[in-house]
Image (cartoon, rainbow, N blue to C red):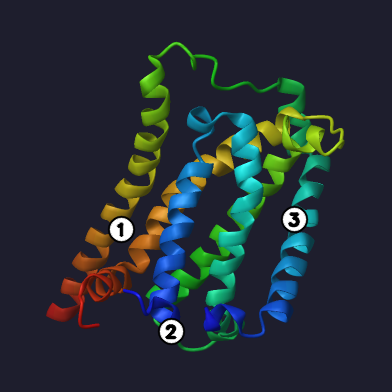
Amino acid sequence: MSDWKQNLQKTRYVMDALLLVSFMIVSAPQATGVPLHEWLSLLFIVPFAIHLLLHWDWITHSFKRLFSKISAKERFNTVWNYLLYLMMLLATVSGFLVSVALLPTLQIDINIQDFWSKVHHDSATLIMPMIGIHLALHWNWIVQLTKRMVSKKA
Amino acid sequence: MKYLQYQWKSRLFYVLAISILVSVMLVSLEWTSWAEQINSQGYTHGEGEGKMPSILMYILPFVKELILIGVPMLITVALAKLIGRFKKRK
């Protein structure tokens, strides 16, 4: 497992695991408290950006492939990833717009609208089953990499 | 981390630029009639929180997440396997 930094698949696996754990912590404001939830959400941009950077090749090729002859599963996966990205942005942006700790600390005053409170609550809830389906679409990769990570030989 | 460091500055610039652009477009939702309607109706949530034992306050949010992520994941995995078997038989 120590060589994970030298292998792209293993690097993705470790970073994706960190992303999932950090997402679960960030998505539990009832447990962390709202101020910590807001500051952790700001930090969450780092593992999310790392996730995108580690899948750069997919990002640059996916849009073109969408219009070529590909399997239904790959087409669904591509559209789903785009939707998940949009939903993640919506939850993040709406989170900033209902901030009661982070923005006031940074001396930024905003008028919190009920609309953004609802959008933030609904998008943050909807993201969870969307992530579940995202994980399921990569289930074989997850199982394969888990075995490789646990195995001493690989 | 060599895979992460490869051309990371330019790639991160593109990721952030596109994300900020899309975010600005999403912010424009607040000028839609949908937003106006919700703002005029009002919205609250989580009134019942704070009444449960403190230990559950730390556990239940994660249980909720595990269910909301895990159940759709398992259903999709099962469906994908079923579709795979069905295609093999054909």
Q: Are marks 2 and 1 on the same chain?
A: no
User: Which residue in the structure is indicated by mark 3?
Assistant: B23
Pinpoint residue A131: horizontal percent, then vertical percent: 44, 55
Q: Amino acid at mark 3?
A: Ser
In this rendering, which labeled residue sits more in front, label 1 or label 3?
Answer: 3
Categorize mark 2 by other alpha carbons within 10 Å: few (<14), some (14-19), many (20+). few
Most foreground residue, B69 or B41: B69
Q: As drawn, is B57 to the left or to the right of B1?
A: left
CA–CA distance in space, label 2 to label 1: 32 Å
Q: As drawn, is B62 to the left or to the right of B26?
A: left
The chain letter under disc 3 is B
Q: Residue at x 48, y 30 (%)?
A: A31
**Disc 3 secondary structure class:** helix
Q: Amino acid at mark 2?
A: Gln
Q: Amino acid at mark 1?
A: Thr
CA–CA distance in space, label 2 to label 3: 34 Å
Q: Are marks 1 and 3 on the same chain?
A: yes
Tell me, yes or no, whether the two marked residues, 2 and 3, touch with CB atoms within 8 Å: no
CA–CA distance in space, label 1 to label 3: 30 Å
Pinpoint residue B9: horizontal percent, then vertical percent: 72, 78
For this orientation, the residue located farthest to the front is A2
The chain letter under disc 2 is A
Q: Is residue A3 above or below residue B54?
A: below
Q: Residue at x 45, y 70 (%)?
A: A77
User: Which residue in the structure is indicated by mark 2?
Assistant: A6
> Which badge, 1 or 3, is on the more N-terminal residue?
3
Q: Is residue A11 above or below residue A104?
A: below
Q: As drawn, is A124 to the left or to the right of A101?
A: left
Q: Residue at x 36, y 67 (%)?
A: A137
Q: Residue at x 72, y 28 (%)?
A: A114
Pinpoint residue A121: horizontal percent, then vertical percent: 58, 35
Pinpoint residue A37: horizontal percent, then vertical percent: 59, 37
